[in-house]
């Protein structure tokens, strides 16, 4: 086969086909993971029906906060786990743990139990799945096509956030709350199934990866610490937005479906802007990065939130706010991906 390809027309080898399939698997895994995590305000509506009670904004935020924080913290555990059992094993374990959350939460009778099952377990499992899924793509595309392959896989974030809230709302409207949670558990279990289908990647030692950023000497680099601080601020602000916008929409008297549309707009615009910035290579121009960051920050805070507070109360204003935030999400993810490439060389 190799001789035919070298003398004939260029083709795609079997190994290349599997590499492309890994990108597809990673895309689906990331879609399920992020779709579940960022749809926590809609998931909370399911639990309100299950427990036949309503919660305050603060109480509703606990589920999303637990899921997001456990996902982020478990990513640290994922690194040594990958080194011990590989990406495939990490995906299987992560998917299994994540699927336990919704299935066990069916028997919960209080908010604390929900946060421990759906929040902690699901967040832990998703965190153990996200890193190996993305890492598998980098292992199969160590040089040529790495940025494009990673971008395609990460676009699952936008797809997941755009589709899962609407899907959960449909389940909530058409079937019992218990079966809605079981369907969600089945979707998370697909992570383990896709992990089984993942081809064995090259050894970590033979490929230079972004995972090397976690070396101890990197902590002494000001550039790395600055990126960590920027990511912390971004994660802090974006998590508030993801949780607050749909909850505030429902508290303002709008339906769960209208709240789900808010999250779908964030995910859809994030995917759209990611494609724009990736196509135009705006993430590689530092001047455009600075201008874009200032403009989005200015619009989202000083102008939109500060000067036009009355607009934000109306549904159309909330919708515009969500779309603007989603567009900024696409820029930030593309920008941080470029920073990751630069840091790989710098460190």
Image: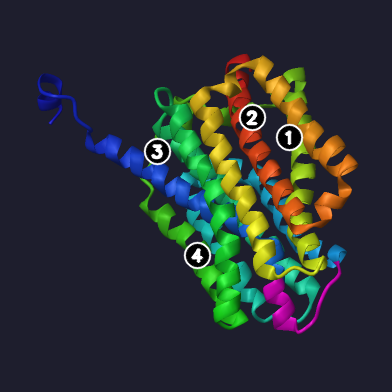
Secondary structure of the residue carrying tag 1 is: helix
Where's residue 322, x and y in %? 70, 49
> Which mark is on residue 201?
3
Q: CA distance from mark 4 to mark 1?
A: 29 Å
What count of labels does the image hold? 4
Callouts 2 and 1 close, C-beta under 8 Å: yes
- Reading the image, the residue beneath label 4 is 187
Q: Where on the picture, by quarter, is residue 131? A: top right
Quarter holding the N terminus is top left
Secondary structure of the residue carrying tag 4 is: helix
Which mark is in front, 4 or 3? Answer: 4
> Which mark is on residue 336?
2
Q: Earlier in the sequence, mark 2 or mark 1?
A: 1
| x 63%, y 23%: residue | 339
Q: CA distance from mark 3 to mark 1?
A: 28 Å
- Reading the image, the residue beneath label 1 is 231
Q: Earlier in the sequence, mark 4 or mark 1?
A: 4
Secondary structure of the residue carrying tag 3 is: loop
- The verdict on residue 289 being magenta is no
Which mark is in front, 3 or 2? Answer: 2
Q: Earlier in the sequence, mark 3 or mark 1?
A: 3
Residue nearest the viewer, comparing 225 with 164: 164
Q: Earlier in the sequence, mark 3 or mark 2?
A: 3
């Amino acid at each position: 086969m190799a001789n035919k390809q070298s003398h004939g027309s260029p083709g795609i080898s079997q190994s290349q086909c599997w590499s492309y399939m890994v990108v597809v698997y990673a895309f689906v895994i990331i879609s399920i993971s992020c779709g579940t995590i960022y749809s926590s305000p809609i998931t909370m509506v399911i639990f309100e029906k299950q427990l036949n009670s309503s919660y305050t904004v603060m109480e509703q935020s606990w589920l999303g906060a637990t899921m997001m924080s456990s996902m982020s913290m478990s990513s640290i555990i994922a690194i040594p786990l990958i080194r011990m059992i590989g990406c495939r094993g990490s995906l299987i374990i992560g998917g299994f743990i994540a699927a336990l959350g919704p299935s066990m939460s069916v028997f919960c009778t209080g908010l604390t139990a929900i946060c421990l099952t759906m929040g902690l377990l699901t967040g832990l499992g998703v965190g153990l799945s996200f890193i190996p899924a993305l890492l598998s793509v980098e292992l199969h595309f160590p040089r040529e096509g790495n940025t494009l392959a990673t971008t395609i896989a990460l676009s699952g974030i936008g797809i997941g956030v755009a589709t899962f809230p609407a899907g959960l709302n449909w389940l909530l409207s058409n079937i019992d709350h218990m079966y809605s949670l079981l369907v969600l558990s089945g979707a998370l279990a697909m992570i383990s199934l896709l992990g089984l289908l993942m081809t064995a990647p090259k050894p970590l030692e033979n490929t230079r990866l972004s995972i090397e950023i976690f070396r101890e000497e990197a902590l002494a680099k000001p550039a790395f610490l600055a990126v960590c601080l920027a990511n912390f601020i971004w994660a802090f602000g974006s998590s508030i937005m993801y949780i607050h916008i749909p909850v505030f929409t429902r508290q303002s008297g709008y339906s769960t479906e209208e709240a789900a549309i808010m999250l779908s707009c964030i995910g859809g615009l994030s995917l759209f802007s990611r494609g724009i910035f990736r196509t135009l290579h705006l993430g590689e121009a530092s001047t455009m990065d600075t201008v874009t960051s200032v403009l989005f920050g200015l619009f989202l805070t000083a102008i939109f939130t500060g000067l036009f507070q009355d607009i934000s109360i109306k549904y159309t204003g909330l919708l515009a706010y969500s779309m603007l935030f989603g567009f900024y999400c696409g820029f930030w993810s593309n920008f941080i991906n470029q920073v990751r490439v630069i840091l790989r060389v710098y460190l």
